[in-house]
Amino acid sequence: MFSAPKRKLFSLLYVVLFIIIIKLLRNVILGQFYEGNNDIELLNCNDYKYLTTSSVISEGWNKLVLKGTWKNISVALKTINAKGHALRKCSNSQEKCIEKQEKNLAQEAHIFKSLNHSSVLKLYGYCFPPSNRHIRDSSLIMEFGHPVDSFLLVQKDFKSRLKQFVIAQNTFKLCDVDDLQIGERPCYSNSHCVSDLKGKDGNIQVPCKNGKCYGLNDLVNVWKACRTIFPYLLSFGAPKSAQDLIEKILLCRENSVDSLKLDTQVKGLIDSI
């Protein structure tokens, strides 16, 4: 068992992580940090001659991330995982399978290039050379970060939810955006703006305005976060004085709370501790 001071420390760590995720969620959904950094000159294929790589940082179904150095600067090289599940299980020709993974990587480069926020890893450059080259030649050069140690956050079963984040320059940052989409769902009528969520009484629905389901992403993402993330972040070692606020926050799933209201509630929780 942990001592009272350690429980309080772990509780504070959870709350800090919680507010970071909420702020990221709100900013992504509402476009508050889709500011763009296109004025920054990014590295290109010609700059790769100064790049050296060493150990593997992480690997997943789609991508492989290597630790690297560019002119004495620590970087992370994100590329296609040639031995990953996505390529091994792809039923198309190898050329088409690789092309699909390259498109996903290019989309990720576009998103990172467009985002400009202290809680998102910086994109230093990218290279997508023409055909007849090694599969790893298509890659992104990213700000280097250390994988999050789930032990510091106490709950080991939360580990899988932390793989989208790293710690770079002592800051908790989003590092994986290949599943992120910017913009609302297109629509022609209100019937297109309904999200069927399993386990929820009824559906989340917003009106169709000017061909977009405005607010649907916001409500759906908050609902999913309330179901899968928040209970784990706030259920361990929370101060008794904060229990009422925590219970109110955890009702966000039933009350269809939007991200702005939820952000206000979380700030209130932070101020109360």
Image: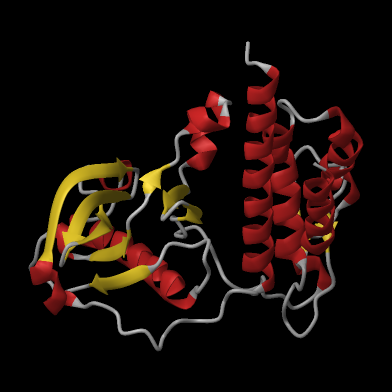
- The residue lying toward the viewer, choosing from 27 and 172, is 172
Q: Position of residue 27 (x, y in %)?
A: 65, 67
Please give left or right for residue 171 compared with residue 86 in the image. Answer: right
Q: Residue 3: x, y in percent? A: 65, 16
Relative to 8, 33 lies left or right: left
Q: Position of residue 175 (x, y in %)?
A: 43, 55
Q: Residue at x 64, y 74 (%)?
A: 31
Q: Quadrant of the C terminus?
A: top right
Residue 267 visible in the shown view: yes
**Quadrant the N terminus occupies:** top right
Residue extending furthest toward the bottom = 39
Q: Position of residue 176 (x, y in %)?
A: 44, 55
* Location of residue 10 with respect to 75 vertically, above or below: above
Compared to residue 183, the image places residue 84 above or below, namely above
The residue positioned 33% from the left and 50% from the top of the image is: 62
Q: 31 or 187, which is in the foreground? A: 31
Q: Compare residues 45 and 207 and report the one nearer the observer.
A: 45
- Residue reaching furthest to the top: 1
Q: Is residue 113 above or below residue 239?
A: below
The quarter holding residue 46 reads bottom left
